[in-house]
Amino acid sequence: DTDSGTIAHTDNYEAVIDDYFALQDRIAASVAQAMEITLGVGEVGSRIGMTRNARAFEEYLQVNEVLRPNPFAPPEIRRGIAHLERAVALDDEFALAWYALAAESVRLDQLSQLEGGDAAARARAEQAIERVVELTPDLPELLIGQFLATNASPDSLDFFEIDRLLDEYTVSAARAGYPIAEITQVEALALFATGRTREAAGLFERVRATDPLNTMVSFL
C-alpha cells in the first residue's frame, strides 16, 4: 500500500515462490534420477532388476500416481497394470517392472475372490514371475512373489510357509540395502494377499510412520 507503507498480499507471492522452488527441486531430482537410470549408477540406477530405459522407468513410476487415490480399488489396479505392461514392452528385461506386474495382478485376483477370482490376472502373474526368474533369480522379493503367484487362493495358502519366506525375504532385502519402509511394505502386502488383514494393517501403520506419502498407506 503506497499510502500507508504497509505490504499486502505477500502470502500469495510467497506461495508462488515456494511452488517455483519446489518445482525446480522436482525437476532437478527427476533429471538426476533419469541420469542414474540411463547410466546404471546411484541408489536407483544400480538396483538389481532396474532398467536403463528412462521411458520404461517413467511408466513404472506412473503406477504410484494411478494407485494413490485408492490402491485397493480394482479399476486403479487395472490402470496401474496397463502402465507396467507398457514398461516391460519398452524394456523386456526390466525385472522390477515384471515383478510389479506380477504383484499387481495377484492383488487384482485376490480382490476379485468374491466374484470367483480373475483367471486372466492370475495367468498374467504367473507369466510375469516366470520372466523375473529368468532375468533376476536372486531378486529378494521373488521369494514371496513366486509363492503367491502360483497359489490359487488365500484359503489354500500355507501360512507357515509364508512366514518362512517373509523371514528369508527380510534378511535378503536387508543385505541388498533395501530401505526398512520398503521391506515392511512388501511384508504387509504379502500378509494382505494371504488374508491376514489385521497383521497387514499393523505393518502398514509402521510404513506410514516412516513414509507418510507412501501410496499403499495414504488411503488408511
Image (cartoon, rainbow, N blue to C red):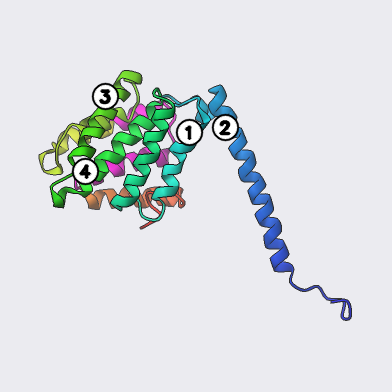
Residue placed at 87% from the left, 80% from the top? 4
Please tell me whether mark 3 sits on a helix, a strand or a loop.
Answer: helix
CA distance separating discs 3 and 4 = 18 Å
Name the quadrant containing residue 17.
Answer: bottom right
Quickly name the residue at label 1: 57
Compare marks 1 and 2 and give the one earlier in the sequence.
Answer: 2
CA distance separating discs 4 and 1 = 25 Å
Residue placed at 39% from the left, 29% from the top? 88
Amino acid, disc 3: Glu
Point out residue 162 in the picture as x, y percentages from the top left corner.
20, 35
> Badges 4 and 1: C-beta atoms under 8 Å apart?
no
53 versus 60 height, above or below: above
Please tell me whether mark 1 sits on a helix, a strand or a loop.
Answer: helix
Disc 4 residue crowd, few under 14, some 14–19, many 20+, Cα 10 Å: many
Quarter the N terminus occupies: bottom right
Please tell me whether mark 2 sits on a helix, a strand or a loop.
Answer: helix
Question: Is residue 184 in view from this perspective?
Answer: no
Quickly name the residue at label 3: 130
